[in-house]
């Protein structure tokens, strides 16, 4: 595969090889495929509307055993709209998601979730109340997990969402993502380590109306970093860009996203407050 740049053909694989030395052919081909799909997905011929957003999410995870874990996510989003340009003036979305995770092998993680989204004034949906129930099946495959983490996520969503006529209807969507993470001041992810992350995700749905490829819905790119406050508490700050090609005018979302992750929070608090006799505080 090749990329045309400055009137010269440059192999895309060489770009990724220069970024991550020693990357194998399978990983290289996967990155190349999604990089080209991302480029081909952009259609800037129509008029484009841009929206600025601020998103935050709190993730709480609980490990049950070597195979199973549970998670609960709470999040919200603020956005400018067609009627209000000030970002913090309009809260367009609040949600809660309950996850169940099963670790099939060291490389495969299978998950399912049930979520409720309170949507209002979401530019992509419309300027009306549109609550939504969402059921998700998800699989994550890890290509590499030593010096850096490279994974791909396959995600199918069944959405039961209210339309403009206040009638609930089913919507289907498929999402494919590639995620790259690497620690910056250590060789492993642990307490006190900063890390870089980037994701590239494509959305597909049967009733998409974008020009060209009728089933393509949007492209979502994310870049940023995080910090491991402890081995079980992380904070991330990222820039998220979503591009939605539409026949009646493309849409672009520019979002600053803050994510806080707490692993085994109640269990760690219990150990800290009520330590067993003869055992040191695990946080020390």
Image: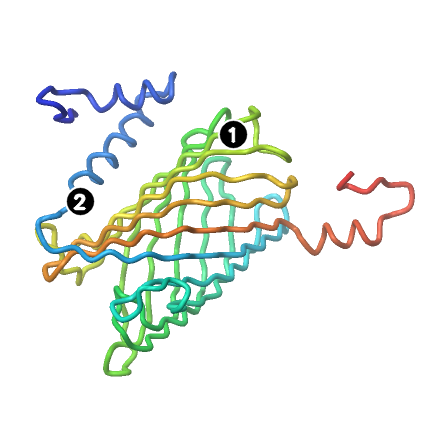
Q: Is the C terminus in the top left, top right, bottom left or bottom right quadrant?
A: top right
Number of residues whose C-alpha sits closer than 10 Å to that of mark 2, classed few (under 14), some (14–19) or many (20 or more): some
Vertical side of 193 occupied by 160: above or below? below
> Which residue is depicted at the point 26% across and 52% down?
203
Q: Nearer the viewer, residue 242 or 140?
A: 242
Vertical side of 179 occupied by 14: above or below? above
Residues at circles 1 and 2 in contact by the CB criterion of under 8 Å: no
Counting from the top left corner in percent of width and height, residue 273 is at 82, 53
**Which label is found at residue 67?**
none
> Which residue is depicted at the point 20% across and 58% down?
49
The furthest residue to the bottom? 166
Number of residues whose C-alpha sits closer than 10 Å to that of mark 1, classed few (under 14), some (14–19) or many (20 or more): many
Residue, disc 1? 183
Q: Is residue 174 left or right of residue 229?
A: left
Q: Sequence-wise, which precedes: disc 1 or disc 2?
A: 2
Counting from the top left corner in percent of width and height, residue 200 is at 32, 41
Counting from the top left corner in percent of width and height, residue 132 is at 36, 71
> Which residue is depicted at the point 47% across and 28% down?
148
Q: Is the N terminus in the top left, top right, bottom left or bottom right quadrant?
A: top left
> Which residue is depicted at the point 45% across and 48% down?
110
The furthest residue to the front? 86
Q: CA distance from mark 1 to mark 2?
A: 30 Å
Secondary structure of the residue carrying numbered label 1:
strand
Q: Is residue 89 left or right of residue 174?
A: right
**Which label is found at residue 41?**
2
Q: Nearer the viewer, residue 123 or 106?
A: 123
Counting from the top left corner in percent of width and height, residue 78 is at 40, 63
Q: Nearer the viewer, residue 207 or 248?
A: 248
Q: Is residue 88 left or right of residue 189?
A: left
């Amino acid at each position: 595969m090749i990329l045309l740049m400055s009137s010269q053909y440059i192999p895309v694989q060489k770009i990724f090889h220069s970024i991550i030395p020693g990357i194998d052919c399978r990983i290289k081909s996967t990155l190349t495929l999604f990089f080209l799909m991302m480029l081909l997905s952009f259609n800037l011929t129509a008029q484009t509307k841009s929206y600025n957003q601020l998103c935050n999410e709190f993730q709480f995870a609980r490990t049950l055993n070597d195979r199973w874990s549970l998670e609960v996510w709470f999040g919200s989003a603020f956005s400018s709209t067609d009627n209000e340009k000030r970002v913090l003036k309009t809260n367009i979305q609040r949600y809660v998601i309950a996850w169940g995770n099963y670790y099939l092998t060291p490389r495969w993680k299978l998950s399912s979730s049930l979520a409720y989204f309170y949507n209002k004034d979401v530019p992509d949906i419309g300027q009306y109340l549109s609550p939504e129930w969402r059921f998700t099946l998800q699989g994550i495959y890890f290509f590499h997990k030593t010096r850096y983490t490279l994974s791909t996520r396959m995600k199918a969503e069944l959405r039961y969402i209210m339309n403009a006529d206040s009638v609930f209807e089913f919507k289907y969507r498929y999402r494919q993502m590639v995620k790259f993470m690497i620690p910056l001041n250590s060789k492993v992810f642990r307490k006190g380590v900063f890390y870089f992350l980037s994701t590239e995700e494509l959305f597909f749905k049967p009733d998409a109306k974008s020009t060209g490829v009728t089933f393509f819905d949007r492209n979502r790119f994310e870049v940023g970093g995080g910090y491991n406050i402890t081995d079980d508490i992380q904070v991330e700050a990222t820039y998220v860009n979503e591009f939605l090609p539409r026949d009646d005018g493309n849409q672009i979302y520019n979002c600053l996203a803050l994510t806080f992750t707490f692993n085994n929070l109640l269990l760690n608090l219990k150990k800290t407050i009520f330590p067993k006799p003869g055992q040191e505080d695990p946080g020390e």
